[in-house]
Every structure is written in structure tokens, then in C-alpha cells.
Image (spheres, rainbow, N blue to C red):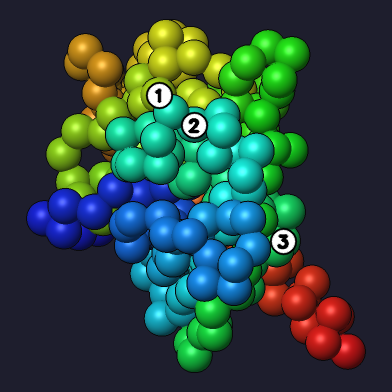
């Protein structure tokens, strides 16, 4: 059942997709002379011979908000901007993908509260997200899974502390074992593998239908 040792981090979306995301650093100024910076990315759904090639175009306003465009400052919001665009059906996964541009704009930033704003998730959604994350990360790598992840917390409009609290609540149900900031999948979680796999298939099908409709 478990596929150990790849060392890859899985990024789960609220729609149920489990993704492997590679960011080709660094951001570089647009070659067209336009006022934005570009970072190429390859995104693959776990277990599928599919991919999306994306050019993340960070606007001048985003550049002003970020201290730098280096990974230490830009990686988390870039990953979450990608996840948000995927949740909004803006990315299509194909066997032979072509590079598509995606805007990373100030719409992802709450200037009133001076923080990133991606997906305001409910506690129920966050709990389901964590179950899926622990399942998929265990399937790809085995071992422990960071549940108090600040990148996920930013994506979900929550805090690492809240994610840990919800994971601990689910540990009582026997689906995972929480140690420190990490969790291990237990048999109670693996019994729901079919549901997690079905959610991935459903999310991919929804994406395919949307883009097939647009192509006419």
C-alpha cells in the first residue's frame, strides 16, 4: 500500500487533489518587458501520467508586498497561489502539456489585514484536508507527516497551531497518531483509502470537463 522513500512533498488541494509541485527557481523579469516576474513550475497529480507546465507571473504589486523573490519569502505564497488556481479550474493536466501562464496577483493579498488570503476554509474542510494529506503523504513517502505546516495554514486561512489541534482531535478517533507537529497514518485512516482516491479522480474529472467544455 505505502510507497516509501521518494522524499517528495505532497500538496493537497481543498478539491481533493494530491499534487507533486516542482518550482524552477529563481523568479526572473519578464522577457517581454512587461512589469512582472516569472517562475516556471511543473505540477503532477500523484499516481497519474499527467502534468501541467505553468509560468507563474507575479505582478508588480506582489513584488512590492514580498520582501524578496527568493524561496524563503516567495515559496509559500507561490505554492498556495498555484493551489488556489487549481481549485478554480484554471489548470489542466495532460500527458503532453504546454506551458500556460497563471497570474499571481494582489487578489491573493488582504491589504487591510496585511496578510495573504487564499482559501478561507472551515474546520470541517481543514479536518478533511488533513486526513487526505496524511494519507497521500504516507502513500508517497511513508513515515511521519508534518500537520502543523505553515504553508498549509496560509493556504487554508488558518494557523499551524489550529491545524495541529484539529489533527490531535482526529487522533482520538484512531485514524492517525500525532507526535509533536507530525502525524502517522493508522489503519483507521487507511480504511478510507478508496474515498481519498475517489476524491482525486473526481477532482481530475471536474477539471477535464471544464476544459473540454471551453474547447467546445
Q: Do residues under tags 2 and 1 come within 8 Å of each other at their CB atoms?
A: no
Where disc 3 sits, the SS reads: loop
Give the mark toward the camera: 2 or 3.
Answer: 2
Choose the circle earlier in sequence order: 2 or 3. Answer: 2
Q: Residue 171: x percent and y percent?
A: 36, 17
Give me the residue at 24% from left, 54% from top: 8
Residue carrying label 3: 89
Residue 150's mark? 1
Give me the residue at 36% from left, 20% from top: 148
Choose the circle earlier in sequence order: 2 or 1. Answer: 2
Q: Do residues under tags 2 and 3 come within 8 Å of each other at their CB atoms?
A: no
46 versus 97 height, above or below: above
Q: Quadrant of residue 2?
A: bottom left
Give me the residue at 46% from left, 54% from top: 18
Choose the circle earlier in sequence order: 3 or 1. Answer: 3
8 versus 41 height, above or below: above
Give me the residue at 62% from left, 44% from top: 60
- Which quadrant is the C terminus positioned in? bottom right
Alpha-carbon neighbours of circle 1 within 10 Å: few (<14), some, or many (≥20)? some
99 versus 86 height, above or below: below
Residue carrying label 2: 66
Alpha-carbon neighbours of circle 3 within 10 Å: few (<14), some, or many (≥20)? some
Where disc 1 sits, the SS reads: helix
Amino acid at each position: 500500500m505505502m510507497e516509501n522513500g521518494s522524499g517528495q512533498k505532497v500538496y493537497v488541494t481543498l478539491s481533493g487533489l494530491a499534487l507533486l509541485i516542482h518550482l524552477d527557481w529563481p523568479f526572473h523579469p519578464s522577457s517581454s518587458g512587461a512589469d512582472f516576474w516569472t517562475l516556471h513550475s511543473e505540477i503532477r497529480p500523484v499516481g497519474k501520467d499527467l502534468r501541467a507546465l505553468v509560468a507563474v507571473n507575479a505582478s508588480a504589486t506582489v513584488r512590492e508586498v514580498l520582501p524578496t523573490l527568493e524561496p524563503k519569502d516567495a515559496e509559500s505564497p507561490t505554492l498556495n497561489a498555484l493551489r488556489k488556481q487549481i481549485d478554480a479550474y484554471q489548470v489542466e493536466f495532460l500527458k503532453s502539456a504546454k506551458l500556460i501562464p497563471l497570474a499571481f496577483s494582489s487578489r491573493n493579498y488582504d491589504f487591510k489585514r496585511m496578510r495573504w488570503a487564499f482559501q478561507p476554509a472551515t474546520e470541517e474542510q481543514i479536518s478533511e484536508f488533513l486526513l487526505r494529506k496524511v494519507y497521500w503523504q504516507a502513500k508517497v513517502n511513508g513515515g511521519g507527516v508534518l500537520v502543523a505546516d505553515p504553508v498549509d495554514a496560509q493556504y487554508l486561512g488558518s494557523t499551524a497551531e489550529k491545524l495541529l489541534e484539529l489533527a490531535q482531535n482526529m487522533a482520538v478517533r484512531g485514524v492517525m497518531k500525532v507526535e509533536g507537529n507530525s502525524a502517522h497514518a493508522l489503519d483507521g485512516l487507511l480504511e478510507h483509502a478508496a474515498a481519498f482516491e475517489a476524491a482525486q479522480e473526481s477532482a481530475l474529472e471536474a477539471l477535464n470537463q471544464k476544459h473540454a467544455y471551453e474547447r467546445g
